[in-house]
Amino acid sequence: MTLPTIWRFTSLFTLLVFVTGEPSNRTFPNHFKFGVATSAYQIEGAWNEDGKGESNWDHFLHQHPEVVVDKTNGDVACDSYHKYKEDVKLLKDLGVDFYRFSIAWTRIVPLGRKDSGINPDGIAYYSNLIDELLANGIEPYVTIFHWDTPQTLEAVGGWLNSTIIDHYVSYARLLFELYGERVKHWLTFNEFSQFCEEGYSTGKKAPFKTLVGVGGYQCTHNALIAHAKTFDMYVKEFKYTQKGLIGLSVDTAWAEPKTDSILDKLAAEEEFMFDYAYYLHPIMAGDYPAALKRKINFKSFFQGYHPSRLPKFSRQEKKLLKGSFDFIGLNHYTTSLCSWSTTKFPSPSKLDDCGVKQSQDPSWKISASPWLAQVPYGMRKVLVWIKENLNNPPLLITENGWSTSDSNLDDEDRMEYYKKYLAEVLNAIHDHGCNVIGYTAWSLMDNMEWASGYTEKFGLVRVDFASPNRTRTPKDSFYMYQTIIKNKKLID
Ligand code: PNW
């Protein structure tokens, strides 16, 4: 048999299994990196120490403790502001290649606007953290904004007010100046969908506004422009000397058609457009998807919104947006089943604009977070969908994890989740050639889970919130992840 004939009769899958052994023995590529993630508000505490300004989360949870289920807040959280060296020891022990953390804008620029002053102590904190990481062989991956808007800017509309764009860009420039020699991976934003839709439309996250069908689009629009301007600024002013990479993290739940019917398949496609392409098409192609614009503009017109509820990018903004990324960060946790809604959604709303009903299969295992079901195939399908529909960009999984209501050290369910999801990452790489460059577990330790307070725990490490020491104790999943990282493969 000639070689081409062998190629024709041997699927890529079979070949890869032949080359790499059984699927369960598959390894992560040599260049593949492992990390863990946290965010500033969720772990740091020290909310007003050493010159830090007030963020929207500080402000709203102090004013309205009742918006958090256990009426807690992030005033102390894991106290990482004081215990960062202990955190780095844990990271070193875990063996991660990188640590994804976020910088609190108000620690660096307390009043949000750079011209109102910067805070040397806050600057020193992250500088020390970065040095400590590097001294331990761990790369810092920095999220510039993980939802904690300076309250001074929130008070004048936050992300609804386009003046925030330039303040954000100045803050980002300062970070590149301060830390760019040492930080080579930047994420401009974490999950537009969560802080924009939930912050300004459905009112589940700070600033808890309910401008349904309008606020989320406006916020996303401004944040996308801030992202594009920051990317452009980095390329023009820093990239040549600092040689870093810039991406952003988007939230990518998989949308599975509820049945095999054409209609349900179309419903899932519609969900992808509103969940992924809405955010990713602008940064890849320079504008929102045409079908999304048509749909929202059409509905807006008949609802009496002139102009449309979906803002328009200028020609200059489109130019900046197009190709404004080095890699895409994916936060993936779960899957939903999609069908067309037979009951009406409130109108106007993003839900109504999309028109798709989402549900969970009753057989799925649900975590302590009601939205988070364990559906491992969703991980593979997301990676493959993005590869096939969005031109195979480099993908970094920036979050993936499982919540429990207790903090038990024998966290079997979390271990099962990680093993199954990581197996699907391997399948995406080996069977489908997805360009996945790394994986990040959420989270290093139990922390302040936003409006769920401390009731949903995502940590590989237990934190004793009853003790002023915030004592940290690794769970079984910590040791399992440690072994996976060491071996670059899954161990049964
Ligand atoms: C992410 N969903 O949020 C955030 O980046 C983290 O700060 C957070 O702690 C973590 O996930 C766990 O919740 C999400 O409904 C919240 O699909 C909700 C969803 C996805 C991500």
Image (spheres, rainbow, N blue to C red):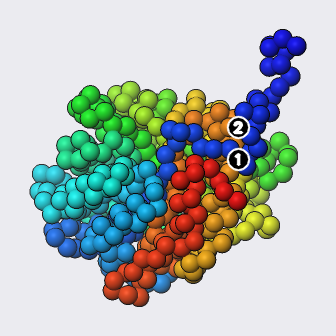
Q: Residue 15 at x, y = what percent?
A: 77, 30
Q: Nearer the viewer, residue 332 or 308?
A: 332
| Residue hosting label 2 | 20
| Residue hosting label 1 | 25
Q: Image point 30% across, 72% down: which residue?
A: 83
For label 2, count other residues whose C-alpha is less than 10 Å away and answer few (under 14), some (14-19) or many (20+): some
Q: Residue 3 at x, y = what percent?
A: 80, 14
Q: Is the Cβ of the residue at disc 2 closer than 8 Å to that at disc 1?
A: yes
Is residue 295 shown left or right of residue 441? right
Q: Image point 43% across, 29% down: which residue?
A: 322
Quarter location, residue 100: bottom left
Q: Nearer the viewer, residue 353 or 86?
A: 86
Is residue 131 shown left or right of residue 316? left
Q: Nearer the viewer, residue 492 or 161?
A: 492
Quarter location, residue 207: bottom left
Q: Quadrant of the N terminus?
A: top right
313 shown above or below 71: above
For label 1, count other residues whose C-alpha is less than 10 Å away and answer few (under 14), some (14-19) or many (20+): some
The residue at the far bottom in this view is 466
Q: Amino acid at mark 1?
A: Asn
